[in-house]
Amino acid sequence: MNLFQYWNNAYIFILVLQILCIIHAYKTGRRDMILLLIFLPGIGTAVYIVVEILPEINRGEFFHNVLRYIFPNALLHDLQRKVAISDTVTNRLALASAYGEQKKYDKAIPLVKSCLSDLYANDPGILLLLAKLQFHAGEFTESITNFEKAFSSKKVFMKKAEDELVYAQALESGGYLEKAEDEYKKVVRIHQSIEGMYRYGVFLKKRQRPQEARTQFQALLKDIGLHPRYVRRLNRKWIWLSRKEAAGL
């Protein structure tokens, strides 16, 4: 192999890696990395692999995410096959979650509802999944009802920040603004949620309270420096959006 062929093959290899990384960044919401990948293809691709891909591989998430974001139908067909072979609650819920990720709520919601029977009639985990799907489908009243039913269960010892945050959004979308604000404040105060801080700032902005919204965004940007690097990396979307919102107020 002569030198020209070597560099030509290396260029093709880097180009393929660059394209795959751009697709991965777009599909997984890391869109702030796309410019780096486009304008610095070699170095940018290497940085992206080290910073984004390798941690996913170490956490055992990479290959699932490849199926989930790049080949979603392959994952969906596999889950449909599992339900056909063994129609268990676990398999149905996994399929419903996959439908939800593809925004096929008309298929996801009935599937989750079918699991709420017998021993699982009041299962808080299933109710929370149903409530989140109903929120994304625009069924806010039903979503709020199922969130509150799940939260009242004696089996729920500690509420997750992501669940309480979607509940706050459902309350806001359903017109329960005072209650929604209380929930946003709770998510920020108890969970120190970066996304919660951002969404509460947006809530305040929508309510025509720009000074309070600016204070909220600035607090997020100040506090984020105290967090470890991996937390900043996981929340880069909310950091970027908060900077944008703060600059516009």
Image: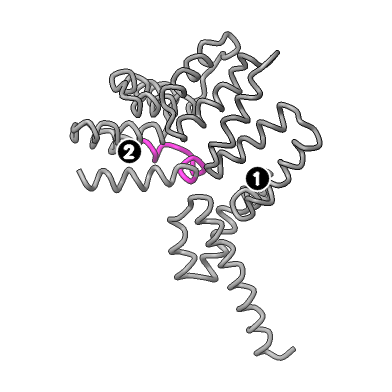
Coordinates of residue 65 in the picture (x, y in percent): 63, 48
Q: Are marks 1 and 2 in contact (CB under 8 Å)?
A: no
Report the side of 243 relative to 195 (left or right): left
The relative height of residue 59 versus residue 21 in the rendered view (above or below) is above
Which residue in the protein does label 1 denote?
Answer: 61
- Towards the viewer: 69 or 45: 69
Q: Name the amino acid, label 1.
A: Glu
- Towards the viewer: 240 or 46: 240
Coordinates of residue 220 in the picture (x, y in percent): 34, 36
Furthest-top residue in this view: 154
Who comes first in sequence, dot 1 or dot 2? 1
Magenta stretch containing residue 159, yes or no? no
Q: Name the amino acid, label 2.
A: Lys
Coordinates of residue 185 in the picture (x, y in percent): 34, 23
Report the side of 154 relative to 248 (left or right): right
Q: Which residues are magenta?
A: 221-233
The relative height of residue 19 versus residue 188 in the rendered view (above or below) is below
Magenta: main secondary structure: helix
Q: Residue at x 53, y 37 (%)?
A: 105
Which residue in the protein does label 2 denote?
Answer: 222
Disc 2 crowd rating (10 Å Cα; few below 14, some 14-19, many 20+) is: few
